[in-house]
Image (cartoon, grey):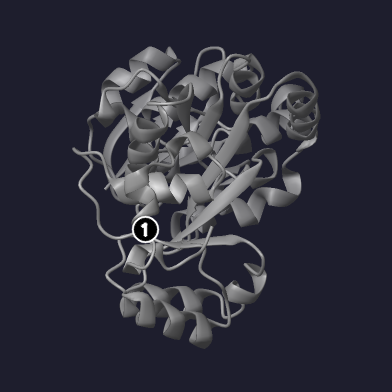
Amino acid sequence: MNVIVSNKYQELLSSLDIDIIKSINGEFEVDELISMFANFFYQRMILDITAIKGYRDSKNLQKLSMALDMKKIILLLDDSDDTLSSDYLSRLISMGIYNFTRNLEGITYLLNNPNSYRDVAHIHQLDQLTETVNEKHVNSNVRVLGIKNLTEGAGATSLIYMLKKQLSRNYSVIAIEINKKDFVYFNDKDMISTTRDQFPTILLKAKDIDIILVDVNESKTEDICDDVLYLLEPSSLKLNKLIRKNRNVFRELSGKKIILNKSLLDSRDVLDFEGEARTNVFYNVPPLNDRVHNKVLDSFLAKLGFGRQKSNEASNEKGKILGLFKF
């Protein structure tokens, strides 16, 4: 069932031939909309942008994007100069708002064919990120390490949490997720949920931080990271899904750091995997207990160049399955 929030385009939206569980009309503060729908179950919401008070200020849309699942929302734009501008549309995309249109035909299409970032990437302006990368390298010694799932549910969020805990013993560390809200469940003030639009601001303010761990997911922020880890859960099901989605995935990953995560493969299995995929594995990480100190992560972090993590225990792991790769 679907929700309609209308104002200026009430008559247009009333002509939609869809099942509706709730329909409201008027102009609402962002906090009102969040209060009404944050815990309300619906399949899709068609949101008339003129129903949002202050919609010309992208900060109000940002607040909405942090509270609601924007993948379920179709934003009906008006024909004002503000929303027609490429800068405004680019800001929407930075917030993870990909489903927007200006007419009934667009709404009908997006109900059945929701956009991904790939569909709107040509609209996205990346100048701010480029400037931020240049300024970061000039003014800060912070190291930005991105972590990205390649197979579904490969464990980026949990791995970031465990890496942050262990790095924090020797470094000043924060973790950032972009266009997601999973970090809230770790109850850690140094694990920050933000939008792609606000990410450069956080990055530039992190002058006294040694390391920033970034869950890049679909935010397309790899270019702003100093290094990126690409996580694969090496089960047959997950790998076959990945290959069917993109047969050239391992060719595209040539020279990049591939991490087998939540992996039950032994050293022989890893070598077989590398041969079959014609790729190199940077590290093989087993399923881990996030409540304890995992020595294998010290060894892993040392290989990534975080030398303070290296310990006698980590060095002794050479020769074991997870010490397969030489430093």
Task: Identify whether 76 is placed above or below 117.
Answer: above
Give percent across and percent down for residue 41.
23, 39
Residue at horizontal 76%, vertical 38%? 125
Q: Amino acid at mark 1?
A: Ala
Residue at horizontal 56%, vertical 12%? 54
How many marks do you count on the picture?
1
Residue at horizontal 38%, vertical 41%? 311
Q: Quadrant of the C terminus?
A: bottom right
Residue assigned mark 1 = 154
Q: Callout 1 environment at 10 Å: few (<14), some (14 to 19), or many (20+)? A: many
Give percent across and percent down for residue 285.
35, 59
Give percent across and percent down for residue 270.
41, 77
Residue at horizontal 46%, vertical 45%? 301
On the image, which quarter does residue 319 sit in? Answer: bottom left
Q: Is residue 260 visible in the rendered structure shown here? A: no
**Does residue 176 appear left or right of residue 165 in this picture?**
right
Give percent across and percent down for residue 8.
54, 25
Q: Secondary structure at mark 1?
A: loop
Q: Is residue 256 visible in the rendered structure shown here? A: yes
